[in-house]
């Protein structure tokens, strides 16, 4: 089998080589500088390679070397807090060696191979272990990194050492094989697990519109499509900061450089509300901006998913943010056109849907072979051109994911944030999660959500009449419906991500808010039946107090006081009448 060939043709990031017989997805070193690439097509004696670096200057006749290995991610202590490019080269390491501009043909290991980690064994000599079994732990920032038996190794533990080791040093011997803390895993292959579990535990985010109206479970899949400026990045940052996942993997896939710069600048400064430590210490960032080589963008999502699955195998709940899958699809479209493949809708390759499915299917809550339970929840931002949700990437994504948070430009113009449209968004997980909500929050929680959605839908129907004849022509009952819907929108659905109190709302407080708004609605309906003017009801001090309460430091005490005061003010209203 030939291990070295030569370049036959160069077409942008796609290089054709001859004189070499590799396997699909083998990593190649292309040209004199050894640019990194991956085999994506084999046609007769020609091998087609997508190169992850800029190919300008390459010419026919230059050498191509087959490494014989697929693209792998380095997994082990030191991942958390790292910032990588699409092929897991640490950007701070590249910057220290070559300055602000990445040169071609430079490789860097994904992990620090010189740093020593204090390994504490939890298994002991003589134990029978299999792939995925936990051997011991390493303290990684304030997280516990569990060292697992790599795949391909099983048997009795013949030796297990205690002490400080680099990721390359042997920590033990199992079945005659030396075991290290470092694992290499092909990024395009999902890591195995015991069995998939039902998605019946919610991923709590502290965002009222998400947790109550359109919840996503641990191990669920969701999409946030929206036009420029509607708040995709802020929403994903809120999910990263406040969701009850222990590990966050954020993939900046083909986004504009200034947006990624903002993420890289703000994430290290964010404080983990649970521990007070920097949020970055339990986060992995993968930065692959739109001006970086297009082929590396295509594999960045697989690199991020492999890292997420690695922590899932330890028993952690991982939240993966892909921003944005549209840029990933555009990279596939460019590579496909270079390969002269038959284009599908809008020029995207015919296998677009299959690739999206492969990615999202790797999400899930699972039981691992080592007995732990972990999950990978995937939220993909979609950036449709011009906000057109009928384009292929959005439509194919919606066929796969089960939560749809539709960002709306009109809500953004009205300064309603998060700008998630409650009429077009949906969650198909609510039936799975309702039992959890009944057991852990309140029996009537699902019923309250349904009531709120009914009110908002009635408001939408009434708005059509209002636009024709004006609100004054409506009967008082319908005027009151509009006012209650306004309360749901302004008090409950709107949330200020930058306010220290309102940025996070625990689930029991969300329930209290919804309960108080429904109580107000019931009392207001009785008042209207007794011929009390709608303006008098709307002008009650308790309504304004409820609206302002979400910004108060003593918010829970304030809600208790409002609950006591509300019936009294309605009684007074009846007496005045």
Image: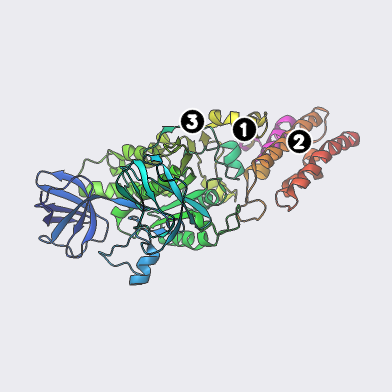
Query: For this view, does 176 lie left or right of residue 314?
Result: left
User: Which numbered marker is on residue 198?
Assistant: 3
Question: Which of the two labelled residues, at mark 2 and mark 3, occupies the earlier sequence position?
Answer: 3
Q: Give the residue drawn at x 77%, y 41%.
A: 538
Question: Which of the two labelled residues, at mark 3 and mark 1, occupies the earlier sequence position?
Answer: 3
Residue sitting nearer the eye, 574 or 196: 196
Task: State the quadrant of the C terminus.
Answer: top right
Q: Mark 2 and mark 3 in contact? Answer it, CB < 8 Å.
A: no
Q: Quadrant of residue 471?
A: top right
> Is residue 482 covered in magenta?
yes
Question: Which of the two labelled residues, at mark 1 and mark 2, occupies the earlier sequence position?
Answer: 1
Marks 2 and 3: which is nearer the front? 3
Q: Give the residue drawn at x 15%, y 52%.
A: 16
Magenta stretch, residue numbers: 467-489
What kind of secondary structure does the magenta stretch mostly adopt? helix
User: Could you classify mark 2 by the number of other residues whose Cα lies within 10 Å: few (under 14), some (14-19), or many (20 or more)?
Assistant: many
Q: Secondary structure at mark 2?
A: helix
Q: Secondary structure at mark 1?
A: helix
**Dot 2 corresponds to which residue?**
520
- Residue 94 location (% of width, % of height): 35, 66
Alpha carbon separation for disc pair 1 and 2? 23 Å
- Residue 518 location (% of width, % of height): 72, 34
> Is residue 348 covered in magenta?
no
Against 455, residue 185 (above or below) is: below
Q: Give the residue drawn at x 37%, y 42%.
A: 393
User: Could you classify mark 1 by the number of other residues whose Cα lies within 10 Å: few (under 14), some (14-19), or many (20 or more)?
Assistant: many
């Amino acid at each position: 089998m030939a291990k070295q060939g030569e370049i036959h043709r160069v077409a942008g990031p796609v290089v054709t080589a001859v004189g070499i017989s590799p396997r699909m997805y083998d990593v190649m070193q292309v040209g004199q500088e050894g640019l990194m690439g991956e085999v994506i097509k084999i046609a007769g004696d020609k091998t087609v390679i997508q190169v992850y670096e800029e190919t300008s200057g390459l010419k026919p006749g230059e050498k191509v070397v087959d490494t014989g290995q697929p693209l792998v991610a380095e997994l082990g202590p030191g991942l958390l807090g790292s910032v990588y490019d699409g092929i897991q080269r640490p950007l701070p390491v590249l910057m220290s060696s070559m300055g602000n501009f990445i040169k071609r043909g430079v490789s860097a290991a994904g992990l620090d191979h010189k740093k020593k980690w204090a390994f504490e064994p939890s298994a002991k000599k003589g134990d029978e272990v299999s792939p995925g079994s936990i051997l011991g732990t390493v303290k990684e920032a304030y997280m516990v990194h569990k060292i697992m038996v790599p795949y391909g190794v099983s048997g009795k533990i013949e030796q297990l050492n205690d002490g400080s080791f680099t990721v390359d040093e042997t920590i033990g011997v199992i079945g005659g094989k030396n075991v290290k803390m470092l694992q290499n895993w092909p990024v395009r292959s999902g890591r195995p697990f015991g069995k998939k579990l039902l998605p019946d535990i919610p991923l709590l985010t502290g965002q009222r519109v998400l947790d109550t109206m359109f919840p996503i479970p641990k191990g669920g899949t969701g999409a946030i499509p929206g036009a420029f400026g509607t708040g995709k990045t802020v929403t994903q940052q809120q999910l990263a900061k406040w969701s009850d996942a222990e590990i966050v993997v954020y993939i900046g896939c083909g986004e504009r450089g200034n947006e990624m710069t903002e993420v890289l600048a703000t994430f290290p400064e964010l404080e983990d509300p649970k521990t007070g430590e920097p949020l970055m210490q339990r986060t992995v960032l993968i930065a692959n901006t739109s001006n970086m080589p297009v082929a590396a963008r295509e594999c960045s999502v697989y690199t991020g998913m492999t890292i997420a699955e690695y922590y899932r195998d330890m028993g952690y709940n991982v939240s993966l943010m892909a921003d944005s899958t549209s840029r990933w699809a555009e990279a596939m479209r460019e590579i496909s056109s270079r390969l002269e493949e038959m284009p599908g809708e809008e020029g995207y390759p015919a296998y677009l849907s299959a690739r999206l499915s492969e990615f999202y299917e790797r999400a899930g809550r699972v039981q691992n072979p080592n007995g732990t339970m972990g999950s990978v929840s995937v939220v993909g931002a979609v950036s449709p051109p011009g906000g057109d949700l009928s384009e292929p990437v959005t439509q194919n994504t919606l066929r796969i994911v089960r939560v749809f948070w539709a960002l709306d430009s009109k809500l953004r113009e009205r300064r309603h944030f998060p700008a998630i449209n409650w009429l077009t968004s949906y969650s198909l997980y609510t039936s799975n999660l309702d039992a959890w909500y009944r057991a852990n929050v309140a029996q009537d929680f699902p019923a309250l959500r349904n009531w709120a959605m009914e009110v908002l839908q009635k408001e939408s129907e009434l708005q059509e009449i209002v636009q024709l004849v004006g609100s004054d022509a409506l009967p008082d009952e319908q005027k009151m419906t509009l006012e209650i819907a306004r309360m749901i929108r302004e008090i409950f659905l709107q949330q200020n991500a930058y306010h220290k109190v309102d940025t996070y709302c625990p689930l029991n407080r969300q329930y209290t808010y919804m309960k108080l708004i429904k109580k107000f609605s019931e009392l207001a309906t009785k008042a209207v039946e007794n011929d009390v003017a709608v303006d008098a009801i709307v002008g009650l001090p308790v309504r304004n107090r409820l609206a302002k309460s979400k910004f108060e430091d003593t918010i829970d005490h304030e809600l208790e006081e409002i609950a006591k005061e509300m019936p009294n003010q309605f009684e007074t209203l009846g007496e005045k009448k």
